[in-house]
Amino acid sequence: MKILHNRHVLRHGYLPALLSALLSACGGGGGGAQVPPTVGGQVQGFRPNTTLSLGINGFVENFSSQSYSVPLNFKFSQSFNSGDSYSVTVERHPQGQICAVTSRATGYIQSSDVTGVQVECHDTLLNDTGISRAADGSLLLPDAGDGRDAQASRLTKVGAGVLGFDFTKICSSGDVVFSDSCPITPAFPQNVWSCTRDNVTGLVWSRDSHASDASAPALLCGKTGWRRPTTHELLSIVHAGKPSGTAIDTDYFSAQPSVFLATDSYVDGTAGKVWGVDFGNLGAASGITPAAAAAASARVRWITGTAMLNDPSPAVQSYQRTPIGTDFVLVDTRRELMWLIPQNPALKTWDDAVASVAGINSVQPGGYGDWRLPDRNELDSLVLRSAKNPALDAGFYGDNATTFSQSFWTGSPYVVDSRLAWGIDFSYGDISPYTKSTSARVIYVRARVFNTP
C-alpha cells in the first residue's frame, strides 16, 4: 500500500486522523475501531432540578443537576475528529440563574477527549434595571452589557415580562391567571387578576396601588402578611429603561397616574420623611415629608413574602473582607457579588469612570479580570437606609466613613437624557440622575462565582 505525504494534512494537524484511517485500511491499528474524541467538563453551582442548555458547534444538548454542592460532570454526545475546532456556548440558562463558560470555551480536538470545559452558574436574586437600548437601537452601555437584561433571550422564565423581568399574574383566588382569565367559583364569582408574583425575588405584589393611608388587606390572592415594601423591594420592580410613562412593566402592574409610591422606611429612622420611589422619574428614590407625600397624592403598592431584599442587618450580613494591597475585596455571599473597594475611591466623571474599568482589569485585582461598574440595583443593594453618613454597613466602609458619605457612580445611563447617568448618595441613600460631567466616586463589582478575564 502506498502512503502519500501531504503538506496540507501535516500543517493543519490532521496527521493522527489520517494515520488512523490508513492503518485501519491496511488491517493494522491493534484491532477494534478507535473511539472518536469527545468534549466535556464540569458545571459548578448548578441549581438542582433545573435544565441548562449548552451548545457546541451548532448542536444543543440539555443537562440537569441534582445538587448545588457537587459539580456536574457533563459530556457532549457529538464526536469529533482530531484537528477539529470546537466552541461551547450557553444556549439557555437554568431557571433563576445565569451561567458562563469560564474555561476552554473554544479550542482544537487532539487525539484524546477534551475534559476541561468549565461552566459556572450563579443565582440571580436581584432584578435587572430594564436599561437596554437607546431610541436609535444602540446598547446603553455599560449597564446593558451584563445581567439578566443582556441574557433575556436565553433565560428560562417561570412566567414572562420584558427583558430580564419574570412575572406571573395571580387571581383573587390565588390561582395563576391562565389564558388571561381566572376560574369562576362560588367562593370567587368575580375572580380577576389582582396580584403579580415576581419569580426572581419570590415576592408577591398587589396589581394596583392604593391610597398611602389605606390599611393593608388581611387576605388577598390567597395570601396573608400584606405590608408596605422596603425601599429595596420597591426598587426591584422599577423598569428604568422606559423612555416615557410609568417606570414599570405595565403588562403585569396597573399604570396608575399617581406615580410616587411610599415605602415602610423613614429617612434616618425618624418620622420626618418617608422613603419613596418616583415611578414617574424612572425610579428615583428619595425622602419626602408626609405633607409633601399627601400633596403629591403618594400611594402604596402592597407586598407579601420573605423580605429577601431588605436592608442588610450588620448582625446577619456576612461580608468577607480580603485586603489587596492598600485596597480590599468584599464578598457579598447573599447576592453572589464581589466588590473591589479602593481605600480612597477616586473622584471621576462618569465617562472616566466607565473608561477606568479597562485599566482595573488589566492588572486583575484579586486574580480577576471581569470587574465592572455596578448597575443601579447592585449599588443600591449596599445601602443601609436605617443609617446615615454613610448609609452603609460599617463592615463595608471600614474606618473611612467620611469618604463613603458621598456620591458614587453606577454604570446605568439615564435613558431620557444622554447627558445624565444614575448615581447614589451614600450620605442617606438617595438615587438620582447626575450630570455625567459631575465628579463622583467609583467602586467596582463582579459576579462572585465567575472568573472571565
Image (cartoon, helix red, strand yellow):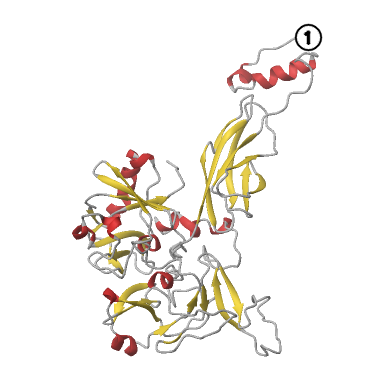
The quadrant of the image that shows the C terminus is top left
Residue 245 picture location, percent across and down: 44, 77
* Viewer-proximal residue among 345 and 244: 345
Residue 370 picture location, percent across and down: 40, 45
What is the three-letter code of the residue carrying label 1?
Answer: Met
Q: Which residue is mark 1?
A: 1
Mark 1 neighbour density, 10 Å: few (under 14) some (14–19) many (20 or more) = few
Q: Is the residue 392 above or below the residue 281 in the image?
A: above
* Viewer-proximal residue among 2 and 219: 219
In percent of the image, x 55 and y 47: which residue is there? 69
Extreme residue toward the left, this view: 402
The quadrant of the image that shows the N terminus is top right
In percent of the image, x 56 and y 37: which residue is there? 117
Extreme residue toward the top, this view: 1
Q: Is the residue 264 above or below the residue 9 in the image?
A: below
**Can residue 154 be seen by looking at this rendering?**
yes
Q: Is the residue 42 above or below the residue 134 in the image?
A: above
Task: Specify the quadrant of the image occupied by residue 369.
Answer: top left
In the image, taking residue 342 as reference, residue 27 lies left or right, namely right
* Viewer-proximal residue among 438 and 203: 203
In the image, taking residue 131 as reference, residue 218 lies left or right, namely right
Task: Specify the quadrant of the image occupied by residue 291.
Answer: bottom left
Residue 368 picture location, percent across and down: 39, 42
Extreme residue toward the front, this view: 315
Residue 315 picture location, percent across and down: 35, 61
